[in-house]
Amino acid sequence: MRISLVSIPVQDPVKAHEIYTSILGFKSVEFNPDAQLAVVVSPEEPNGTALLLEPCRGTFAEQYQKSAMDAKLPVIVFGVTDVAKELNRLKEAGVIVRPDLDNPEWGLENMFEDGCGNLIMLQELLA
């Protein structure tokens, strides 16, 4: 058994699709703005786990999203080869990096806001 699809709550799937593809660099697998359906994958693993950018406005997931943000908890962790380099790229693209969450003892110096209501953590992958 393996993970094939993970849902991430977002306020607006159309906006999230734009952010996740044009800024974060994911590849669109399925996108239907009228149906509020957006699915993306990593270009590094196009047959890997897909992300469903799930509309949460007006659902139980909206409270979950708010609670996770208020608690400063990431909803997902993305792996990259160089966290510092990726954070710099994201900052240059206008993404909000959360220095207020810096705590190297816990490894939390690498969180950013996805622009859709979530905190995302970056984990440096070992070569």
Image (cartoon, helix red, strand yellow):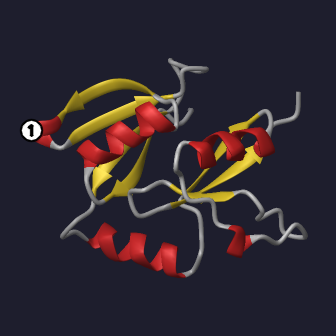
Whether residue 85 is visible: yes
Q: Is residue 70 left or right of residue 116?
A: right
What residue is drawn where x is 71% and y is 68%?
Answer: 99
Q: Position of residue 117 (x, y in %)?
A: 41, 64
Q: Position of residue 34 (x, y in %)?
A: 9, 38
Q: Amino acid at mark 1?
A: Asp
The C terminus appears in which quarter of the rendering?
A: top right
Whether residue 124 is visible: no
Q: Helix, strand, or loop for circle 1? A: helix
- Counting labels gives 1
What residue is drawn where x is 52% and y is 50%?
Answer: 94
Q: Is residue 88 left or right of residue 50?
A: right
**Residue under pointer 1:** 34
Q: Residue furthest left?
A: 34
Above or below: residue 17 compared with residue 63:
above
Crowding at mark 1 (Cα within 10 Å: few <14, some 14-19, many 20+): few
The N terminus appears in which quarter of the rendering?
A: top right
Q: Is residue 46 left or right of residue 12?
A: right
Q: Quadrant of residue 88?
A: top right
What residue is drawn where x is 29% and y is 46%?
Answer: 15
What residue is drawn where x is 51% and y is 18%?
Answer: 46
Q: Is residue 94 left or right of residue 55?
A: right
Q: Position of residue 71 (x, y in %)?
A: 56, 80
Q: Quadrant of residue 108?
A: bottom right
Q: Position of residue 58 (x, y in %)?
A: 18, 70
Above or below: residue 24 compared with residue 71:
above
